[in-house]
Image (spheres, helix red, strand yellow):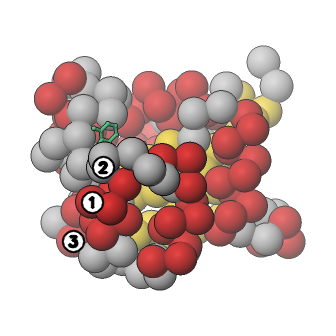
Amino acid sequence: MPMERTLAIIKPDAVAAGNAGKIISMIEQAGFRILAMRMQKLTRAEAEGFYAVHRGKGFFEELVAFMTEGPVVLMALEREDAIAKWREVMGATDPKKAAPGTVRALYGTDIGRNASHGSDAPETAAFEVSWFFRGSELG
Ligand code: CMP
């Protein structure tokens, strides 16, 4: 299985609740290498551009408002099968459907406030990592 990269976000709900460290620990325990990491409050333009594929959907405004309400932790992660593995560690998008012990089951509230984000395919991972990190930051 080749090495792969993915973009992980610890969302504003989880950062505000003081759960960022526990989620970073879960990422390390799952064997990811953190290539780059930064905490910042997203601008509206950054959030809208990042989630551009969802523009026009009913939840888009709510999603952008949520993602800009407080700081997030952005991470570029690497390991074998990173995209699928990080999605497994996060659990289902809706925390009520997420498997016990996953990030979203432990720290999410509902489908909107769901503690974390992960890329869903190699093309989106490449776009999402480059949206927040320059190549020179990825070691
Ligand atoms: P995320 O993996 O960050 O990608 C898009 C986000 O939109 C998703 O997680 C959810 O948090 C959010 N979202 C809000 N409402 C919905 C919805 N009804 N269906 C899917 N995603 C939603």
Of the two numbered discs 3 and 2 in the rendering, the one whose residue sits closer to the viewer: 2
Q: Is mark 1 within 8 Å of ligand 1?
A: yes
Q: CA distance from mark 3 to mark 2?
A: 22 Å
Disc number placed over residue 62 in the picture, else none: 1
User: Can you identify the residue that label 2 sits on?
Assistant: 59
- What residue is at 75 percent from the left and 47 percent from the top? 126
Query: What amino acid is labelled 2 in the image?
Result: Phe
Residue 99 appears anywhere in the view = yes
Name above or below for residue 81 compared with residue 44: above
* SS of the residue under disc 3: helix
Name above or below for residue 102 compared with residue 118: above
Tags 1 and 2 touching, CB below 8 Å: yes
Q: Residue furthest front?
A: 56
Of residues 14 and 42, the one drawn nearer to the viewer in this rendering: 42
Q: Is residue 93 left or right of residue 97?
A: right
User: Can you identify the residue that label 3 sits on?
Assistant: 16
Q: Quadrant of the C terminus?
A: bottom right
- Which comes sooner in the sequence, label 3 or label 2? 3
Query: What amino acid is labelled 1 in the image?
Result: Glu
Name above or below for residue 3 compared with residue 133: above
Q: Quadrant of residue 106?
A: top left
- Which comes sooner in the sequence, label 3 or label 1? 3
Q: Using a 10 Å C-alpha cutoff, classify the residue at mark 1 as few (fewer than 14 neighbours), some (14 to 19) or many (20 or more).
A: few
Q: CA distance from mark 3 to mark 1?
A: 18 Å
